[in-house]
């Protein structure tokens, strides 16, 4: 891919989008989380082994925005879990391919978790493999694969990745 001022500006805009996504989750503004996705999106949290073998399995698997909204509703109304604070760190945002308003990206993530009575721990590390669409209102995720490098998930997977 050729790098230019336009490419650098696009990467900066994408980083801002990713950082706003992380802030939404870190501040537990879960009702805003679906706003980052298209109506016909796909969101999946999966293990690296499954992704590398092209297996469809996921720890979380949503095939449209309504399923993402249902997940938020379930988190707010039916799920009981110990209060926690999360911090998402996103780095290495790379543009893999551009096709009109569709952008394929890859980035790294680390999620730190703090429970009320324990020291913070690394909850999850991995990479985001995304298809992002540029709209008149900004960027939206069309497809988001959260590929975890963890051997196992330390605690139950509560808050979105």
Image (cartoon, grey):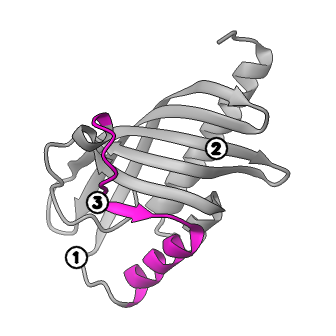
- Residue sitting farthest toward the bottom: 77
* Frontmost residue, 48 versus 36: 48
| Label 2 – label 3 distance at C-alpha | 22 Å
**Nearest-to-viewer mark from 2 and 1:** 2
Label 1: few (<14), some (14–19) or many (≥20) C-alpha neighbours in 10 Å: few
Label 2: few (<14), some (14–19) or many (≥20) C-alpha neighbours in 10 Å: many
Residue under pointer 1? 82
| 123 is higher (above) or lower (below) than 14 | below
Q: Is residue 136 left or right of residue 40?
A: right
Considering only order in the chain, which callout, 3 or 2, is on the residue closer to the N terminus? 3
Could you tell me if the residues under marks 3 and 1 are in contact, i.e. CB atoms within 8 Å?
Answer: no
Which percent across, then down, holds residue 106? 50, 32
Residue under pointer 3? 59
Residue depicted at 50% across the width and 49% down the height: 144
Q: Quadrant of residue 104?
A: top right
Residue under pointer 2? 132
| 13 is higher (above) or lower (below) than 46 | above
Which percent across, then down, holds residue 26? 44, 59
Q: Is residue 153 left or right of residue 6?
A: left
Considering only order in the chain, which callout, 1 or 2, is on the residue closer to the N terminus? 1
Which secondary structure, mark 3?
loop
Residue depicted at 75% across the width and 12% down the height: 4
Range of residues picked out in magenta: 52-77
Which percent across, then down, holds residue 3? 69, 11
**Nearest-to-viewer mark from 3 and 1:** 3
**Which mark is drawn over residue 5?**
none
Considering only order in the chain, which callout, 1 or 3, is on the residue closer to the N terminus? 3
| 112 is within the stretch colored magenta | no
């Amino acid at each position: 891919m050729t790098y230019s001022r336009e490419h650098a500006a696009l990467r900066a805009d994408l980083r801002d989008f990713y950082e706003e996504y992380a802030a939404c989750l870190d501040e537990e503004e879960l009702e805003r989380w679906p706003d980052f996705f298209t109506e016909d999106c796909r969101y999946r949290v999966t293990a690296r082994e499954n992704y590398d073998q092209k297996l469809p399995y996921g720890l979380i698997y949503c095939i449209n925005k309504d399923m993402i909204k249902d997940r938020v509703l379930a988190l707010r109304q039916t799920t009981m879990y110990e209060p926690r604070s999360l911090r998402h760190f996103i780095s290495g945002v790379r543009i893999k391919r551009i096709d009109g308003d569709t952008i394929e990206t890859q980035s790294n993530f680390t999620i730190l978790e703090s429970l009320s009575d324990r020291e913070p721990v690394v909850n999850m590390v991995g990479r985001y493999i995304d298809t992002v669409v540029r709209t008149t209102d900004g960027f939206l995720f069309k497809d988001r694969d959260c590929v975890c490098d963890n051997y196992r998930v330390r605690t139950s997977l509560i808050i979105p990745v």
